[in-house]
Image (cartoon, rainbow, N blue to C red):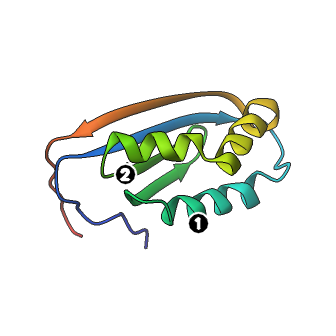
Amino acid sequence: MAKLEPMFETPYYAVVFASVRTPGDYGYSEMATRMVEMASSQPGFLGVDSAREEIGITVSYWRDLESIKRWKAEFEHKEAQRKGQESWYQSYTVRVARVEREYDFGL
């Protein structure tokens, strides 16, 4: 059974990464796993939810905008961004949103 991240104290921020992949792996799976491991150790990181079918959607949750900026500037993450543009993605969109409230069912 799939598991969603638990609720967080609001407000917090969500970075929504929606993507369309290119065919083939080319090291993508290994790098995706590494990025979640690295993000998890970053100050301000709260969690991540991800799903992939025709369109992949990964939502990472952060305590504040400064934490997101530090993560975006992290060297290995920048390298993953470069490889993504060169090899892994046909297209992607990044959205940053402030979460003011949340509610759930069945967690």
- In this rendering, is residue 4 above or below 19? below
Is 63 or 91 nearer to us in this picture? 63
Snapshot quadrant of residue 6: bottom left
The residue that label 2 is drawn on is 61
Q: Is residue 47 left or right of residue 23?
A: left
- The percent position of residue 4, horizontal first and vertical second, equals 36, 63
Residue lying at 31% horizontally and 43% vertically, measured from the top left:
13
Residue lying at 35% horizontally and 40% vertically, measured from the top left:
65
Q: Is residue 68 left or right of residue 65?
A: right
- In this rendering, is residue 58 above or below 105? above
Q: Is residue 11 left or right of residue 84?
A: left
Q: Label 1: few (<14), some or many (≥20) within 10 Å? A: few
Amino acid at circle 1: Glu
The residue that label 1 is drawn on is 37
State the separation of the CA atoms marked 2 and 1: 14 Å
Is 52 or 11 nearer to us in this picture? 11
- In this rendering, is residue 106 above or below 71? below
For the C terminus, which image quadrant? bottom left
Snapshot quadrant of residue 55: top right
- The percent position of residue 9, horizontal first and vertical second, equals 17, 58
Amino acid at circle 2: Tyr
- The percent position of residue 95, horizontal first and vertical second, equals 42, 30
Q: Label 2: few (<14), some or many (≥20) within 10 Å? A: many
